[in-house]
Amino acid sequence: MSSDLFPTASSYYAAVNPAPAPRPRLDGVRRFDVAIIGAGYTGLSAALHLAGRGVSVAVLEQARVGWGASGRNGGQVHTGQRLGQDELERLMGPADARKLWNMAEEAKGLLRALIADHGVDCAYEPGLIHADHKPHFVEESRAYAEKLARDYDYPHVEPLDRERLRALVKTDAYYGGSIDHGGGHLDPLALAYGLARAAESAGAMIFEGFRARRLVRGRPHRLEDGEGAAALADTVLVCTDGLLEGVEPAVESHVMPIANHIAVTAPLGERLKDVLTTRAAVSDSRFVVYYYRPTPDGRLLFGGGETYSTTLPKDVAPIVRRHLTKVFPQLRDVALEHAWGGVLGVTPTRLPFVREIAPGVLTAAGYSGQGVLLGPMFGKILGDAVAGRLEGFDLLARLPVPAFPGGTWLRKPILVAAMSYFALRDRL
């Protein structure tokens, strides 16, 4: 997969975060305790926590740090796992559902600690609004807020009727919703850059421009780039989310890449109040979700529209504008100064795929849009598993994540059909 896939100059995050100097390439054959594929949140957090234990760690990134979904997502920090607690109770039982909730709350604490302890300037803002685009969803949102307060000791989700939501989000597109005062949003590329600096300070090595093309399992495992460079390691962590191609079929059969699109307006000045009267982020109840938030410099960042290819459109802005004006027709004349796309990984159940694929080969992928919160935590859990602390890893490995029917060959047409169906339901 070529690094030309993502022209970073078009990203708002790349414009406001000066890129660090390129990291070195891996030359020849090098030996490490642990080799990590992917310099996103999961891989960087795993490297940070392993290096802090004195483990020899190499992070192998095919392009640049934060080049994948970690550096180009919507920046939203949600509460909980990707599925709601009622669904997790049905799938996993009340005891494991509670453990998964506790893990997600611990992930919030870890994220805050990483930001504070390592001086990561990622413009974190509290508050995340859930907006219901269908009338009958409003009662479900109210009941879920009550459930979290009653059953999970989480009183931070406040239900909103249509009038109260309309006061915060200036659109007629929604019927109500809720605001999670424990959620928030941040600059995702700044977070990736900060985690990389922290990992290197702890002793981890990051190599850029290494595209893993072959994994030869053995003692040690051997990761090759096909151009003469190779990393030998006792343990390999596959932390690529949706950006894995041809290296580990067990991951690819469970995790499907999809592309999402984001645009950022020109500075809105006083017009921002005609859209949002809150600094909170917003995501809505569509299956193909719309999400948006104010930026520190007074713009609106808006995400909407998915495609099922790792080849992005040449011009993303018109795609996003169609969705943006459905929610905010008052912005139809506003310039979109930055527009870009990114590839994330989804699974059939929208639950993450966390497994030991083979002895000494572990993965955490398929966050399905929840990676800002879960990626750093799951990286820590991978590091714990390497060190022999398996409680968190074993819990995640019990999540029901079947392979896509037909494996890597048929996963795309099946997912496209399913997503098209749910997109139609969003419009009805």
Image: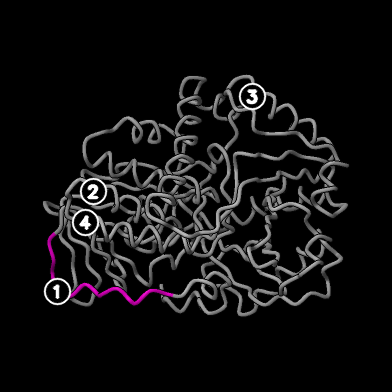
Q: Amino acid at mark 4?
A: Val
Residue linked to disc 3: 149
Q: Is residue 75 magenta?
A: no
Q: Which residues are magenta?
A: 19-31
Residue linked to disc 2: 52
Picture layout, residue 69 above or below residue 284: below
Rendering coords of residue 421 (x, y %): 70, 50
Dot 3: few (<14), some (14–19), or many (≥20) neighbours within 10 Å?
some
Residue linked to disc 1: 28
Ranked by sequence position, the earlier of labels 2 and 4 is: 2
Residue 295 occupies which quadrant of the picture? bottom right
Residue linked to disc 4: 57
| Magenta stretch, overall SS | loop
Rendering coords of residue 26 (x, y %): 21, 72
Dot 4: few (<14), some (14–19), or many (≥20) neighbours within 10 Å?
many
Ranked by sequence position, the earlier of labels 3 and 2 is: 2
The label nearer to you, 3 versus 4, is 3
Give the tally of numbered discs. 4
